[in-house]
Amino acid sequence: MERKINITQHSGTGMLWFIGWLFTIGYLNLNFIQGLLGLVVWPYYLGSHFAPMVGG
């Protein structure tokens, strides 16, 4: 019996998010602790901003 394996890679979106996060830390001159806090807070604000556009 032959099985099909389907591999889907979504690294482009994650890489774009990571680059944006690093740019934000550098642009705002954040220290390490503020950068870690931004790791949690920044995606929340992006999600709450763009959620109405995608019907969420």
Image: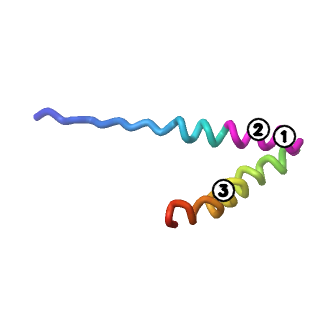
Real-space Cα separation, disc 3 to disc 2, in angstroms: 15 Å
Measuring from the top left, give residue 7's x and y in whole percent. 35, 35
Which one is in front, 5 or 27? 27
Residue drawn where x is 78% and y is 43% of the image: 24
Disc 2 residue type (three-letter): Phe
Spot occupied by residue 46 in the image (x, y as percentages of width and height): 66, 56
48 or 15, nearer to the observer: 48
Q: Secondary structure at mark 3?
A: helix
* Quarter of the rendering occupied by the N terminus: top left
Q: Is residue 29 magenta?
A: yes
Question: Which of the 4 image quadrants contains residue 22?
Answer: top right
Q: Label 1, secondary structure: give it.
A: helix
Residue that mark 2 sits on: 23
The region drawn magenta spans 19-30
Residue at the spot of label 3: 46
- Residue picked out by circle 1: 27
Q: Main secondary structure of the magenta part?
A: helix
53 vs 33, left or right, is: left
In the image, taking residue 14 as reference, residue 44 lies left or right, namely right
Could you tell me residue 38's position as x and y percent? 76, 52
Identity of the amino acid at label 3?
A: Leu
Do the residues bearing badges 2 and 1 touch, measured as CB atoms within 8 Å?
Answer: yes
3D distance between C-alphas at marks 3 and 1: 17 Å
Residue count near mark 1 (Cα–Cα under 10 Å), binned few <14, some 14–19, many ≥20: few
Q: Name the residue at 60% across, 36% down.
A: 15
**Relative vertical location of residue 8 with respect to residue 33 in this rendering, above or below:** above
Q: Secondary structure at mark 2?
A: helix
Whole-number angstrom distance, CA of label 2 to CA of label 1: 6 Å
Q: Residues within 10 Å of mark 2 (few under 14, many from 20)?
A: few
Q: Amino acid at mark 1?
A: Tyr
